[in-house]
Image (cartoon, rainbow, N blue to C red):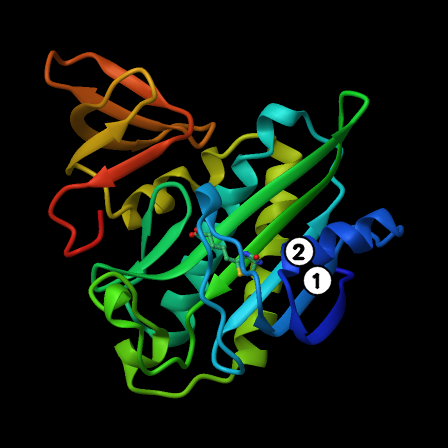
């Protein structure tokens, strides 16, 4: 990608900064990266722990000409890209917890927060924020059974700059395929093979009522197909799916 990297030692959140830069006219392909975030954002209003100098916190600003209902597919494209890079570069078995967590040994190593802004019914910009636990050696006790880092899994210190470059390049490649196709059949099979939820019992936390089922994989829109106990297949668009049996991490 013709990308421009904007670096900060410390920022509130790279997603927030990317949004501010977008307002000031920053171009598609701008990557905002920080050594530390003071208000790192997770999904659903959670915070994302962002200590100094150990991990990767970055946001890719995109200004794609696509329909609003397709934007969430970009989260899938990014999760797929990160999982591929981790697997290829580090030789560790990366899995994906739909839609957007990368998991190593049953613990979360990467989260993705995609945010979008609209202006007069069209998508103005999309912020794909990525947090990867790279070289961090220890987590606060409440996270220890849920989170891990590449270092903790491989016992190797990773060159964060090289990892960043690989992820950006992989994402760019996949992004171009996605833009052309406007759907996800090109990655469906491989994504599903990395899906930690696949063929597992999951609990779908639907706002209209929780239900259980078996996750079958994503469809070409990136939605999760879940077979309920009565054999009906539900399509899960968003919301939280918890995976039973995944150690400490539901
Ligand atoms: C999640 O809850 O799993 C999503 C976490 C996303 C964290 C990243 S770190 C870089 C970017 N800036 C933020 O404030 N959040 C995302």
**On the picture, is 239 further left or further right than 9?**
left
Per the image, label 1 sits on a secondary structure element best described as strand
At 46% from the left edge and 60% from the top edge, which residue is drawn? 48
Q: Position of residue 201 (x, y in %)?
A: 14, 35
Please indicate whether residue 205 sits to the left or right of residue 213 in the image.
right
Is the distance from the Cβ of mark 2 to the nearest ligand 1 atom less than 8 Å?
no
Q: Are marks 1 and 2 in contact (CB under 8 Å)?
A: yes
Front one among 14 and 173: 14
42 over 231 or under it: above or below: below
Q: Residue at x 51, y 44 (%)?
A: 75
> In terms of image quadrants, where is residue 189?
top left
Q: Position of residue 236 (x, y in %)?
A: 35, 24
Q: Position of residue 27 (x, y in %)?
A: 83, 53
**Mark 1 vs ligand 1: CB under 8 Å?**
no
For residue 224, above or below residue 121: below
Q: Is residue 137 above or below residue 49?
A: below
Q: Residue at x 64, y 63 (%)?
A: 12
Instruction: Write down the residue under mark 2.
Output: 60
What residue does disc 1 label?
31
Disc 2 is placed on an element classified as: strand
Relative image position of residue 200 (x, y in whole percent): 15, 38
């Amino acid at each position: 990608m013709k990308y421009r990297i904007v670096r900060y030692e410390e920022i509130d959140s790279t997603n927030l900064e990317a949004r501010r830069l977008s307002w000031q006219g920053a171009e598609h392909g701008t990557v905002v990266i920080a050594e530390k975030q003071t208000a790192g954002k997770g999904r659903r209003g959670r915070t994302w722990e962002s200590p100094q100098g150990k991990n990767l916190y970055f946001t890719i600003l995109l200004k794609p000409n696509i329909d609003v209902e397709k934007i969430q597919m970009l989260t899938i494209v990014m999760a797929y890209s990160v999982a591929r890079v981790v697997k290829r570069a580090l030789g560790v078995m990366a899995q994906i917890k739909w839609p957007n967590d990368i998991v190593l040994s049953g613990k979360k190593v990467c989260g993705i927060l995609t945010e979008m802004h609209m202006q007069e019914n069209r998508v103005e910009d999309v912020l794909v924020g990525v947090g990867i636990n790279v070289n961090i050696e220890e987590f606060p006790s409440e996270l220890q059974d849920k989170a891990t880092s590449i270092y903790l899994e491989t016992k190797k210190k990773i060159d964060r700059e090289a990892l960043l470059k690989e992820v950006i390049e992989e994402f760019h490649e996949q992004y171009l395929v996605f833009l052309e196709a406007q759907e996800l059949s090109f990655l469906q099979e491989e994504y599903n093979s990395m899906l930690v939820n696949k063929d597992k019992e999951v609990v779908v936390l639907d706002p209209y009522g929780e239900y259980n089922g078996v996750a079958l994989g994503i469809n070409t829109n990136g939605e999760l197909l879940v077979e309920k106990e009565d054999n009906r297949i539900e399509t899960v668009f968003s919301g939280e799916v918890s995976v039973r049996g995944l150690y400490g991490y539901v």
